[in-house]
Amino acid sequence: MSIHDFDAVNLGIMWDRLIAITDEVTSALVRSSFSTIVRESGDLSVVLLDAAGNSLAQGSYSVPSFTGTAAPTLRHMLNRFPPETLRPGDVLATNDAWQGTGHLYDINVMRPVFRGDDIVGYTISITHLPDIGGPGFGASASEIYHEGLRLPICKLVREGELDETVIDVVRNNVRVPEQVFGDLMANVTCNEVGGRQLLEFLDEYGLDDVEALSAQVRAASERAIREAIARIPDGVHASEVTLEAVDEPVTLRCEATVRGDEIAIDFAGTGRCVARGVNVPFCYTRAMALYAVKCLTVPTMPNNEGATGPVTVSAPEGCILNAQPPAATGARHVIGHYVVPSVFGALAEAVPDMAQADCGHMNLVTFQGTHRDGRRVSTLYFASGGFGALSGRDGAEVTPGPSNMGSVPAEMWENLTSTTILEKRLLPDSGGPGRSRGGLGQEITFRNDSGADMQLFCMAARTDYPAQGLLGGGEGAPRQVLLNGEAVHPKGTHIFRPGDTFTMREAGGGGFGDPAERPAERVTADVGAGLVSPAGAGRDYGRE
């Protein structure tokens, strides 16, 4: 069947069907996972790729960065194990920071889909593991070797048989082996579901493979993004962002060059790597930059390789956005999440109706210790700041951006960790003022009721440099990390003793546009809802 055999109606139906397959794979992954990181927080992605390694469809719920890393990871896997060496039932895996998603805590699991003797596609799933050894998920390491077990690209399953040696190595290097093994097997299982459903799809439509369909889907996507880029004024658009690294600030410089229907994103001039685990491998930088461009052009288009063709991304080797081994990269999101507002800031004046003020960003804390019943605890708490405002739209309260993980329900968290969530509330006035108001941050307070010391690995940003407003909008409130009411290092490791309290005050999102242009009735409504205090209304909007 040739590429010309798919008319617009059939193409749309089959394209949607492929996405439905990835959604079913995602459902299988979530339902079979052992950790709340996957089941509740959704730190995951599922991607279907054609036989040439082009991403074709992705689960509707996916972490934005993994959209851009899956296809390069597959290419690394096929360089190590060429297609002709793969057999039905093989499953490959790696958590390599440079060949995967930028740090060791994400496992990438791939299964080739065979039809007879031929590979007709690949499925990849990616999840954040609850533990991978080392000191724990945080920013404290100074080299990648400190951060945990680094699995080279390997065959986790060989022709249907689990490699028990690989599993034993993993089990013997992690604190919660049941959860880690359970999540590994959930990845294996969901990819089996994906392969089976792809074969059923081919049989239903009488196709030998998906190559022609993939080409047409990617071509349609590339046309759409090229048309959107062509509407951006040609020229060189730049931004500069200063942010806290660990103990010293670092500057990210972004230059977006638009020429016709193509755009080049360059981070030349960005600061050097640092001796702590916040450095960013280029695979993650590229993925976040691609995501930012897609948000500014065709945000509703399903993700596939076609959207990446008109966009090139570069960063000098050795800068903090192109870290080289053996740089520590565990908390690479702390810096990497700033790639998106850097691109938005560069193109804000060129596409003001699409650009977004800075988000308060997500905050991650690793809790390690012992449950009151004796079980080991090693898991993550995800908490979000406020969403950045857009033209004509207020930022949503406590909504993550640019990543999209969710928070574990309080009752489930307390049962899992033996810590009690004493309070969880919105922070009035934390959203940046503007014609559109930034989303509010929140305050969450935990108490250690486990009866034993715990360790907290903090990875907080926006403590010194709050979310900036856009086109006249004000900045949001900064983030604070408190232990027993006293500020502690936002990227430090802290002892959480029995009875201690730990508080996360999450950053607000930036505002958009001049606050004086915000309609009086909206300010009044904000005050009535408790989102803005009367004093804040007077200070920020000149309203009583």
Image (spheres, rainbow, N blue to C red):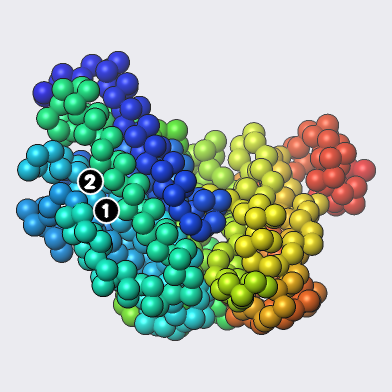
Report whether 78 appears left or right of 193. Answer: left
Callout 2 amino acid: Tyr
Report whether 336 appears left or right of 41. Answer: left
Callout 1 amino acid: Met
What is the total number of numbered labels drawn onto the structure image? 2
Q: Position of residue 204 (x, y in %)?
A: 22, 23
Locate the C terminus by quadrant. top right
Residue 230 vertical position relative to residue 504 in the rendered view, above or below: above
Query: Extreme right residue here?
Result: 544
Q: Foreground: 167 or 434?
A: 167
Residue at left 34%, top 49%? 189
Residue at left 20%, top 48%? 112
* For marks 2 and 1 on the same chain, the one whose residue lies earlier in the sequence: 1
Residue 493's tag is none
Q: Tell whether label 1 touches label 2 (CB within 8 Å).
A: yes
Q: Tell me the residue that label 1 is attached to.
A: 110
Residue 122's tag is 2
Residue 356 seen in the current view: yes
Element under disc 1: strand
Residue 485 in which image quadrant: bottom right
